[in-house]
Amino acid sequence: MRASFFRQRAQMSSVATPRRTRSKSAAPKVGFVSLGCPKALVDSERILTQLRAEGYQTAPTYDAADVVIVNTCGFIDSAVAESLDAIGEAMNENGKVIVTGCLGAKGDMLREKFPELLSISGPQNFTAVMDAVHTAVPHRHDPFVDLIPARRKSKADDVGVKLTPKHYAYLKISEGCNHKCSFCIIPSMRGKLDSRLVTDVLIEAEKLAKAGVKELLVISQDTSAYGADLKYKGGSWRGAEYRTSMLDLCRGLAELGIWVRLHYVYPYPHVDEIIPLMAAGKLLPYLDIPFQHGSPSVLKRMKRPAFAENTLERIKAWRKICPELVIRSTFIVGFPGETEAEFQELLDWLKVAQLDRVGCFEYSPVEGATANELADPVPDEVKADRLARFMKAQAKISKARLKKRVGKLLDIMVDGTDEDGVLVGRSYGEAPEIDGKVYLSCEIPLKPGQIVKARVLESNEHDLHAEVIED
């Protein structure tokens, strides 16, 4: 995911633009490039909110910016390459660049490549970012302007800067992770599990709902572990008591009367407690679970949490309680030592699991990951072959799962129109950015965030086509 206040790279000059000079009376302008996952996007929103609160403005182009912030990703090699490319572009086009985010944890490498960077900091180090901005472009205090914050009229609407459309928002409930998966370096970059108090999360969620958000996407590194580090400390919200736990958080969010979608859920036993809330219509019947593989021996080498759990039986039990449940997941093929027999175990697991939405990636070594030390790396051509076979198998499953929804009447959240002017939306079964779409036929104008009834007319491997039922 890339969010930027700048024009697309292809439209920008390849020649460095002249450095912008600012008049003494003008508010300083900050350019911003945000890379990586939704969790990084939330970090970007927080930085931009603080900039706005201090009177800084955002710049739409490099030459209009007094300084540029690049929030980087460093999870896999391709993400590192994209981040380095973005930093290089910002240096060439502007020259005054502040780097933060996951790749910022590799400060020595960045300093060697870009010695003129103004500042380098790791993820969530918001103080370091703001200190660097203050040093680069001090904001002159104007007592007649700064006393009036740039916010909406209603205090309840003041939810800060959001980089998502107005009708949905990411709700980050924790930082970091306590797991030591052999292919991952997230704990070294983002630290151990650090949960937010349930009352703080619910208050933020309530503000978002009052500001017009119709869908909350709950994110973290491990949503199922939420609150464990706080020993599930309790608090009060709307006159009721809640523990800082996954179940109580979901109970509270369900009171807001808007869509709530759970991401990054690990299949621990206590997730069973959430499914009845979905069956009762209090949460969207949707789970994003990163299973990563179906072979117990591969999962053990990955050091995945809950690798010993019988996930197939758990999925079967969940669907018995909530037949509408949609499960999306991600997998890795070509992990070091993966044999043909283990890959076949994955395909067999996939056939039984019948997941709705799936993404798959070839294993890519990540600097600092312990998996790099494992024996028997899988050749690139074998990885590519297994990826193709995996996706072919899953395409048949996804197509069959979506076909079951043909003829059904669904609630559809309108997202807007695509590049061809076709009206698009999503049902409970589609998360924004990562899943398919519902293409809508409708004779009346509809607005983003509007929820309408639509009957599904046809489907394919990824998307649905539906007709809006007018009242």
Image (cartoon, rainbow, N blue to C red):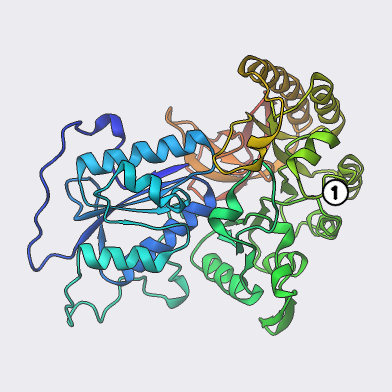
- In the image, is residue 111 above or below residue 423? below
Q: Is residue 242 left or right of residue 144?
A: right
Determine whether, in the image, residue 161 is placed left or right of residue 138: right
Q: Position of residue 413 (x, y in %)?
A: 59, 47
Residue count near mark 1 (Cα–Cα under 10 Å), binned few <14, some 14–19, many ≥20: some
Q: Secondary structure at mark 1?
A: loop
Query: For residue 2, what is the image quadrant?
Result: top left
In percent of width and height, residue 288 lies at: 70, 46
Q: Amino acid at mark 1?
A: Cys
Q: Which of these two is toward me, 250 or 420? A: 250
* Between 256 and 195, the one nearer to me in the picture: 195
Give the image quarter of residue 290: top right
In the shown orientation, is residue 85 left or right of residue 331? Answer: left
Q: How many marks?
A: 1
Q: Position of residue 249 (x, y in %)?
A: 71, 68
Q: Is residue 4 visible?
A: no
Counting from the top left corner in percent of width and height, residue 265 is at 72, 52
Along the line of sight, which residue is nearer the eye, 427 or 261?
A: 261
Residue found 71% across the figure and 73% down from its top: 244
- Residue 53 to residue 449: above or below: below
Q: Does 375 sit left or right of 217 as displayed? A: right
For image coordinates 63% across by 74% down, the residue present is 197
Q: Which residue is mark 1?
A: 322
98 in relation to 75, above or below? below
